[in-house]
Image (cartoon, rainbow, N blue to C red):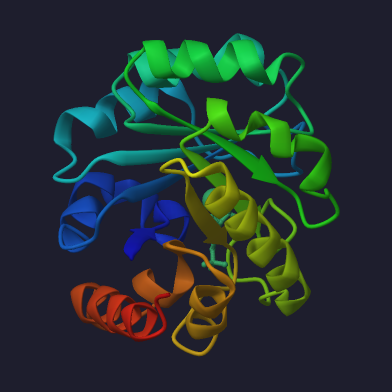
Amino acid sequence: MQISPSILSSDFAHLADELDRISSADWAHVDVMDGHFVPNLTLGLPVVESLVAVSPIPLDCHLMIDDPDRWAPAYAEAGAKSVTFHIEAAKDPVTLARTLRAAGARASMALKPGTPFAPYADLLPELDMVLVMTVEPGFGGQSFMADQMPKVAQVREAVRRHGGEVWVQVDGGVSASTIEQCADAGADVFVAGSAVYGADNAADAVAELRALATNHSH
Ligand code: DX5
Ligand code: ZN
């Protein structure tokens, strides 16, 4: 059970300090948005390169961008240990996943709430993680979509049948009041932005989320 706080909800003027606040977490989730794939613009490769240099924990880069086939490999080459592309934007996901792994990153595929998993189940051998979005990607602080839990369970079941080490991540509206149902459905990596950075003590929030998820692990 791993916690990946999203720095989208942190103070962008003090990113190094904000990473230190979550040093007890497993990953730092970095939301890259290009203003095209989603209607928001955040940060890109130069900032990620700087974050890799100072982060006490590995970076989990979630690329909400068009043409990940072209742009995603550079994030792995920059040192991000997990790189997630959206399947809705990828042209050749097999080649992309192989390129990410060859560059030393875990390769991950994300699904928007309206995107089904079944057409992409054959990609599991190429993947280290599947991200099931529990909000419409683009902004932090949105309401959790419980209607995505059957998809989480479906991915978990496919991973079980496949037999590999593929993690199942949820992202969007994950908090102390929603994380247990995610764990029950089969998620094992939990992104939380506002629930961690909005807390008085980020480390306490990480510990609480991890404990809740662990109590509901399979
Ligand atoms: C949304 C981003 C999320 C976001 C989560 O598009 O992918 O990572 O930061 O924020 P919360 O946890 O506040 O929903
Ligand atoms: Zn994200």
Residue 73 screen position, x and y as percent:
48, 14
Question: At 28% across and 83% down in the image, what residue appears?
Answer: 211
Question: At 75% across and 50% down in the image, what residue appears?
Answer: 112
Disc count in the image?
Answer: 0
User: Toward which corner of the image does residue 165 lie, by quadrant?
Assistant: top left
- Direction from residue 181 to residue 20 in the image, left or right: left
Residue 173 screen position, x and y as percent:
59, 73
Residue 20 screen position, x and y as percent:
15, 55
- Direction from residue 165 to residue 99 in the image, left or right: right
Q: Between 80 and 31, which is closer to the camera in this rendering?
A: 80
Residue 216 visible in the snapshot: yes
Q: Quadrant of ligand 1?
A: bottom right
Q: Is residue 98 above or below residue 177?
A: above
Residue 120 screen position, x and y as percent:
75, 36
Q: Residue furthest bottom?
A: 177
Question: At 41% across and 83% down in the image, what residue appears?
Answer: 216
Residue 134 visible in the snapshot: no
User: Toward which corner of the image does residue 140 lie, by quadrant?
Assistant: bottom right
Q: Between 121 and 189, which is closer to the camera in this rendering?
A: 121
Image quadrant for the C terminus?
bottom left
Q: Between 57 and 185, which is closer to the camera in this rendering?
A: 185
Image quadrant for the N terminus?
bottom left
Q: Is residue 36 above or below residue 135?
A: above
Q: Is residue 116 above or below residue 106?
A: below
- Direction from residue 93 to residue 52 in the image, left or right: left
Q: Is residue 153 above or below residue 167?
A: below
